[in-house]
Image (cartoon, rainbow, N blue to C red):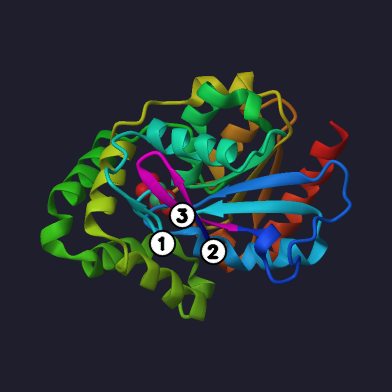
């Protein structure tokens, strides 16, 4: 992991250019596509590691996978109060790393919610989009009330309770007892309660972004685990249908956490997108 100071955040990020297999050598793929991989709630870039491992074998794209403000190894003097602020941090990260070519934004769940303000502010930084187990709609009243309750109480509850509340909705029945479940839940439990509260408030306040879908002009891949209960197959199919030319992939034996449950299949879908971006 590398660290970089961007405004109020000391942002930690993984960059394949520093990865073991690349050892600082930029592969001769012209132009080299950069994937900006944005994690979900309340996780860290670590959720992408199994997918990154697959993608790194091909050396066909550079990957930047940050820990958002307050998550993982990133520290922040003040926490974002809206999803737009997370989007601003990502744009600043790309600028600070001098990544001038547009990137492929890969957003998982909350990382996908952050795409919507990113798209409104920084469309010129995008040349492709992957929406992974995410949503474009805002919350129902009930879901919003649940978020606000967690935001109010998480410091008193402790993160173990957050983990227990989230666990049943994250994984498919096939994977419930696997090692990846434990690893993922450990990340949730180790997240700072203040960060959890800040993100819940930001997600509760997010607007419905479905009207943005028809304006997306870059190659797009929509991927969902077949038994995802948070962003369902039906909802993600509607997202794909609303984006001109979007490809839609349903991944078997995966719930919400497709990136850790089925990394090989997800990496294959992302590589298809990299190919489409290269010829677009
Ligand atoms: C996530 O995985 O990022 C969360 O489940 C998103 C949410 O709480 O809606």
Residue contact at pointers 1 and 2, CB within 8 angstroms: yes
Residue annotated with mark 1: 73
Helix, strand or loop at disc 1?
loop
Residue 141 coordinates in the image, percent (x, y): 25, 34
Along the polypeptide, which appears first: circle 2 or circle 3? 2
Residue contact at pointers 1 and 3, CB within 8 angstroms: yes
Tell me which corner region of the image, top left, top right, bottom left or bottom right, holds residue 181. bottom left
Q: Is mark 3 within 8 Å of ligand 1?
A: no
Mark 1 to mark 2: distance in Å? 9 Å
* Picture residue at 51% right of the left edge, 59% below the top: 45
- Residue range highlighted in magenta: 4-14
Residue annotated with mark 2: 1
Tell me which corner region of the image, top left, top right, bottom left or bottom right, holds residue 208. top left
223 or 188, nearer to the observer: 188
Residue 236 coordinates in the image, percent (x, y): 56, 40
Residue 1 coordinates in the image, percent (x, y): 54, 63
Q: Is residue 249 left or right of residue 147?
A: right
52 or 232, nearer to the observer: 52
Q: Residues within 10 Å of mark 3 (few under 14, many from 20)?
A: many
Mark 2 to mark 3: distance in Å? 10 Å
* Picture residue at 40% right of the left edge, 31% below the top: 84
Q: Is residue 56 left or right of residue 208?
A: right
188 or 254, nearer to the observer: 188
Along the polypeptide, which appears first: circle 1 or circle 2? 2
Q: Residues within 10 Å of mark 1 (few under 14, many from 20)?
A: some
Along the polypeptide, which appears first: circle 1 or circle 3? 3
Q: For residue 49: magenta?
A: no
Q: Is residue 60 left or right of residue 83?
A: right
Residue annotated with mark 3: 67
């Amino acid at each position: 992991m590398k660290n970089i100071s961007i405004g109020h955040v000391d942002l930690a990020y993984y960059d394949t250019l520093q990865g073991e297999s690349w050892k600082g050598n930029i592969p001769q793929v012209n132009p080299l596509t950069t994937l900006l991989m944005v994690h979900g709630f309340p996780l860290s870039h670590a959720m992408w590691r199994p997918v990154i491992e697959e993608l790194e074998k091909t050396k066909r794209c550079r990957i930047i996978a940050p820990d958002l403000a307050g998550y993982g190894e990133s520290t922040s003097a003040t926490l974002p109060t809206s999803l737009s602020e997370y989007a601003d941090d990502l744009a600043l990260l790309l600028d600070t790393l001098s990544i001038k070519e547009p990137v492929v934004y890969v957003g998982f769940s909350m990382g996908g919610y952050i795409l919507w303000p990113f798209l409104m502010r920084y469309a010129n930084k995008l040349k492709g989009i992957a929406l992974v187990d995410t949503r474009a709609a805002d919350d129902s009243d009930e879901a919003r009330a649940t978020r606000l309750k967690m935001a109010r109480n998480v410091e008193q509850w402790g993160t173990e309770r957050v983990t227990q509340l989230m666990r049943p909705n994250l994984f498919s029945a096939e994977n419930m007892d696997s090692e990846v479940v434990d690893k993922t839940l450990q990340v949730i439990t180790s997240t700072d309660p203040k960060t959890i509260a800040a993100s819940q408030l930001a997600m509760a306040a997010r607007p419905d972004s479905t009207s943005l879908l028809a304006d997306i002009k870059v190659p797009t891949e929509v991927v969902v685990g077949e038994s995802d209960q948070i962003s369902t197959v039906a909802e993600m199919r509607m997202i794909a249908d609303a984006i001109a030319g979007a490809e839609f992939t349903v991944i078997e034996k995966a719930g919400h956490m497709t990136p850790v449950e089925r990394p090989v299949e997800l990496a294959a879908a992302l590589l298809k997108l990299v190919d489409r971006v290269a010829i677009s």
